[in-house]
Amino acid sequence: MAKKPAVPSFNQMLDILRAHSFGVAPYAAIQGGMLVGKHGAAAVLVPAPQADAPAAFAVHPGALVRGEVARLLDRGYQKFIKTSQFELPATASQLQAIHLFTEELKLLTGGTSLYNESLGTTSDLYRYDRLKGREAAQPAPARPWELTGGH
């Protein structure tokens, strides 16, 4: 029977990332958080609460803009890079960098790689402006099988 590989500690995992050309630096906004970046994308990792993984995401992967990890926002027709100060349309090279960074990070940290995420970049937020308010405009259809009005 094959042995289960030993799970590295958080510091060992950071050393593995450094050995694979990831930039690793302390992140002051989150206690114990480490900013990990490569290819113009970054994420903030913290030690995982469970013993089966060395790290967990405090801030999910996104484009690194002026030292801040930007969120990926999908508005249906365009993806945007959103920071605390501004929102910019995402370029193809930024989306490719986020995807490549995420796949490499999951491979090296032992994270789960899901099929739909392997196909391309997935967004953190989905805000379709064309759907805003649509659900309130149409009343719910009548359900003849439900009793109403004291029957």
Image: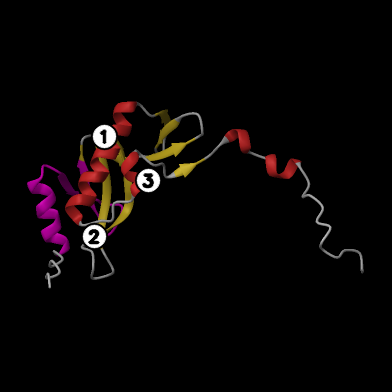
Residue most extreme to the front: 1
Left of 80 or right of it: where is 114?
left
Q: Secondary structure at mark 1?
A: helix
Q: Which residue range is magenta in the image?
A: 9-37
Q: Nearer the viewer, residue 46 or 77?
A: 77
**Gap between marks 2 and 3 measured at Cα:** 22 Å
Q: Quadrant of the C terminus?
A: bottom right
Q: In percent of the image, x 15 and y 69: which residue is there?
A: 4
- Three-letter code, disc 1: Ala
For image coordinates 21% across by 35% down, the residue present is 39
Say which residue appears at 33% left-offset and 33% top-offset. 95
Q: Give the label, 3 or 1, closer to the camera.
A: 3
Which residue in the protein does label 1 denote?
97
Tell me whether circle 2 and circle 3 mark residues in contact (CB < 8 Å). no
The numbered dot on residue 55 is 2
Mark yes or no: residue 26 visible. Answer: no
Whole-angstrom CA distance, mark 3 to mark 1, is 17 Å
Give the percent coordinates (x, y) of residue 48.
26, 64
- The answer to whether residue 92 is magenta is no
Q: Is residue 75 above or below residue 35?
A: above
Q: Which residue sits at x=43%, y=32%?
A: 79
